[in-house]
Image: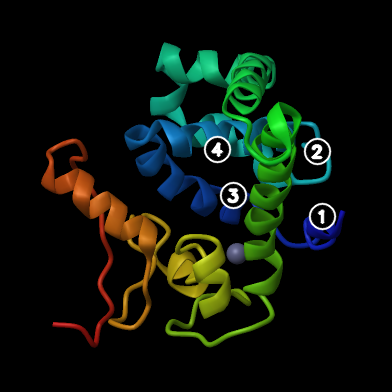
Amino acid sequence: MKTMSHAAPHPSAWQGAQMQQRDDWVVHLTPAHNRELNEALAFAKSRNAEIPALQHVARLTGDLQRDPFYRWLDRWFLLLQLPLAAGLYWLGQRTGVHGGGLGLVLWAIPLRLVLVYHVTWLVNSATHALGYRNFDSPDLSRNCWWVAILSFGEGWHNNHHAYPHSARHGLRWFEFDITWQHIKVLRALGWAQKVRVARYPGNA
Ligand SMILES: [Zn+2]
């Protein structure tokens, strides 16, 4: 798979820590993100030997490791696709959508997973080759607008490397980060607290 091509040389333990930082916050807040992350982590676990950073996931996700709900999702994520598939199939058949129940299942599960994994890994390949740098971080990370759109903000990857603790990746006014908008709404509702945010030095 194309997305694996960059995996071996790049992600260090150091970067794994960074990759995890924001997920800690986001996962805490939204079941949808949590599901995606758990799927990605479980998928990645099988490749632990190839990606040293993943050996540090447990150490870097203390709050999630302590939460029985997230541990349950992590453990059963693959089997949980089955009731989801059954529900979607039933819905597709009942509503008569184009492609029927099977079509709905194929779009909602395999296609979704393929897209999510490709976008996730695209961040670690494209944004180390394409784009510009705001910060002189000791790596090849770059900010790439089209990856930022596809990855909901992760494509502002040089910012992310420079400030791995920041929930906000798009730091300059034109660096749109839809995940950060999402987090802001949650914070306004009081559902997200203690959100850590970096600032671009040029901003007020
Ligand atoms: Zn990176």
Pick the front one: 55 or 4: 4
Q: Secondary structure at mark 1?
A: helix
Q: Residue 26 got which mark?
A: none
Mark found first going from the N terminus, 3 or 2: 3
Q: Are discs 1 and 2 less than 8 Å apart at CB?
A: yes
- Separation of marks 1 and 4 at Cα, in angstroms: 17 Å
Residue occupying image coordinates x 45% and y 35%:
32
Q: Which residue is mark 3?
A: 16
Taking the image as drawn, is residue 115 in sight?
Answer: yes
Mark found first going from the N terminus, 2 or 4: 4
Q: Amino acid at mark 3?
A: Gly
Q: Quadrant for residue 118, please give it.
A: bottom right
Q: Are discs 3 and 4 less than 8 Å apart at CB?
A: no
The label nearer to you, 3 versus 1, is 1
- Separation of marks 3 and 1 at Cα, in angstroms: 15 Å
Q: Which residue is mark 2?
A: 47
Examine the rendered structure and indicate whether residue 149 appears above or below residue 16.
Answer: below
